[in-house]
């Protein structure tokens, strides 16, 4: 019976071979699928990382550029302002000096003069106040003298 192989044996042999091929194929497919998946995943991951890195780099570059531009702009504006404002600062310094001179003049000359005028005015006012009462009395006296003179004048005219 050895020389005669039965169909069942051939079938079993095929089944064994097919099973072995199936296992090999599955292993091969699994390995290739894993490799393909790994490759695809690496590519996608690399792409995503590049995109994120590009975005982050752009943001960082924009931020750094803005900071540097702000600094440069501030420096240039400060220089321009200083250039434009220096004459004004010089004038202000000159005005400060002049204002100090005015203050000193007021303090040393005008205020003492005003104080002296005030004291003279007050003393003159007090004098006029005292004399005003005397003037009122004199006016009354002159009125009386006038009346007496008129009366005497009439009497003298009658006599004459």
Image (cartoon, rainbow, N blue to C red):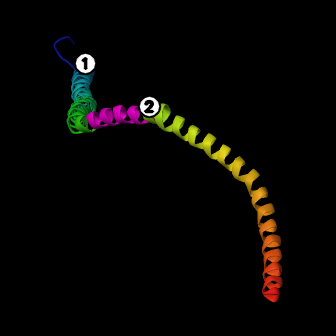
Residue 52 in view: no
- Residue highlighted by disc 1: 20
* Residue at 23%, 30% in the rendered image: 75
| Count of numbered labels shown in the rendering | 2
* Residue at 79%, 76% in the rendered image: 149
- Residue highlighted by disc 2: 104
Q: Nearer the viewer, residue 118 or 66?
A: 118
Residue 85 in view: yes
Q: Is residue 96 magenta?
A: yes
Mark 2 or mark 1, earlier in chain:
1
Q: Position of residue 77 (x, y in %)?
A: 23, 36
Q: In the rendered view, does 3 fall on the left or right side of 101? A: left
Q: Main secondary structure of the magenta part?
A: helix
Q: In the rendered view, does 119 fall on the left or right side of 37? A: right
Bounds of the magenta span? 89-103
Q: Secondary structure at mark 2?
A: helix
User: Crowding at label 2, few (<14), some or many (≥20) Cα neighbours within 10 Å?
Assistant: few
Q: CA distance from mark 2 to mark 1?
A: 117 Å
Q: Residue furthest left?
A: 3
Front of the two marks 2 and 1: 2
Q: Indicate whether 128 appears above or below 32.
A: below
Q: Nearer the viewer, residue 146 or 120?
A: 146
Q: Residue furthest front?
A: 160
């Amino acid at each position: 019976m050895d020389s005669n192989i039965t169909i069942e044996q051939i079938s079993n042999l095929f089944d064994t071979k097919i099973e072995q091929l199936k296992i090999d194929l599955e292993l091969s497919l699994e390995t290739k699928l894993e490799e393909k998946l790994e490759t695809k995943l690496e590519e996608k991951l690399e792409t995503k990382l590049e995109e994120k890195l590009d975005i982050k780099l752009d943001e960082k570059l924009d931020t750094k550029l803005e900071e540097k531009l702000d600094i440069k702009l501030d420096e240039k504006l400060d220089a321009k302002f200083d250039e434009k404002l220096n004459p004004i600062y010089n004038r202000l310094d000159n005005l400060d000096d002049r204002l100090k001179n005015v203050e000193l003049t007021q303090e040393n000359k005008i205020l003492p003069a005003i104080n002296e005028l005030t004291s003279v005015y007050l003393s003159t006012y007090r004098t006029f106040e005292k004399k005003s009462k005397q003037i009122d009395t004199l006016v009354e006296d002159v009125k009386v003298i006038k009346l007496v003179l008129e009366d005497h004048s009439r009497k003298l005219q009658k006599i004459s």
